[in-house]
Image (spheres, rainbow, N blue to C red):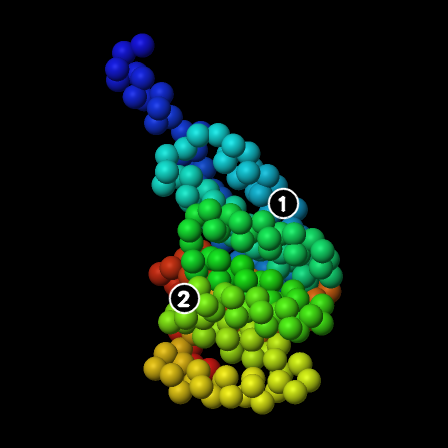
Amino acid sequence: MSIVAHARSLIASNVDHAVLGTARNSIKHVVATYEGQGPWPLVGDMRGLRMTLHNLLRGRQSPSQRRELFVLAAQVSGLLSYMAVNMGRSVLADAYATEAAMLAGEADHVELQMWVLGTRSFGLYYQGHYDEADAAASAGAALDPSSPQAIRLLINGRARALARIQGRGGDAERMIVKRWRSPTGPKVYRSACPRVSPSIPTARPGRRRTRLPRSCPWANPRRSSTTLIR
């Protein structure tokens, strides 16, 4: 084998831009259509994409391709966790959230890790585990306390859970006031999936339709925006 051929064998990859683009577009499709369809028509495609990404990760890629595969796989697992919460499958939701956290950690993607912890907090909240929901949101906010994601986790994750814990309602109110008065308090990111990134739910798990904002920092960074908290 020649020197050049040997080098080519070392950098061979089982993915290309088209494969990664297809995965990204599949995730964006779920984000764009979830509001009108709910989880049932979409969950099968996400399960299939999950398996495809996992199979690809068993092969060889460049470092940048491999990191993107981990990010995409974490996004899919996070979406599946959110879907499972809305379908009333709490055990499955927790399993997918754990998987998403592991994959996001492997990619060293802090914003995605925060997003996953927001999903876990959402699921725990609707199971009535308010202390654990508060702990998950707190852990997410601690990863990057200065980010708008952290403010969303604290206000819509921690404060919401604390308001349900006997004797902690005052803590929730003080937290909101404190964050509102901080320099970045009036601004938060809109995210594609409010059950995955921490945002106030508009419907309880089990209902078919839930309202989703149309942009997400990880799915389309150029479309992420800010909004006033009213």
**Residue 203: assigned label:** none
Name which quarter of the figure residue 66 lies in: top left
Residue 195 is at least partly visible in this image: no
* Residue pointed to by mark 2: 144
Amino acid on which the number 1 mark rests in the picture: Arg
Query: How many badges with numbers are in the image?
Result: 2
What's the residue at 47%, 51% (across, down)? Answer: 105
Tag 1 secondary structure: helix
The amino acid type of the residue labelled 2 equals: Asp
The quadrant in which the N terminus is found is top left
The local secondary structure at tag 2 comes to loop
Q: Residue at x 48, y 58 (%)?
A: 113
Q: Position of residue 33 (x, y in %)?
A: 57, 58
Asked if 109 appears above or below 4 in the picture, the reply is below
Q: Is residue 148 above or below residue 68?
A: below
- Which residue is at 65% across, 56% downward? 94
Q: Is residue 29 above or below residue 206?
A: above
Q: Tell us which disc is closer to us: 2 or 1.
A: 2
Residue 168 on image: x %, y %: 62, 85
Q: Is residue 19 left or right of residue 3?
A: right
Q: Is residue 141 above or below residue 172?
A: above
The residue pinned by badge 1 equals: 47
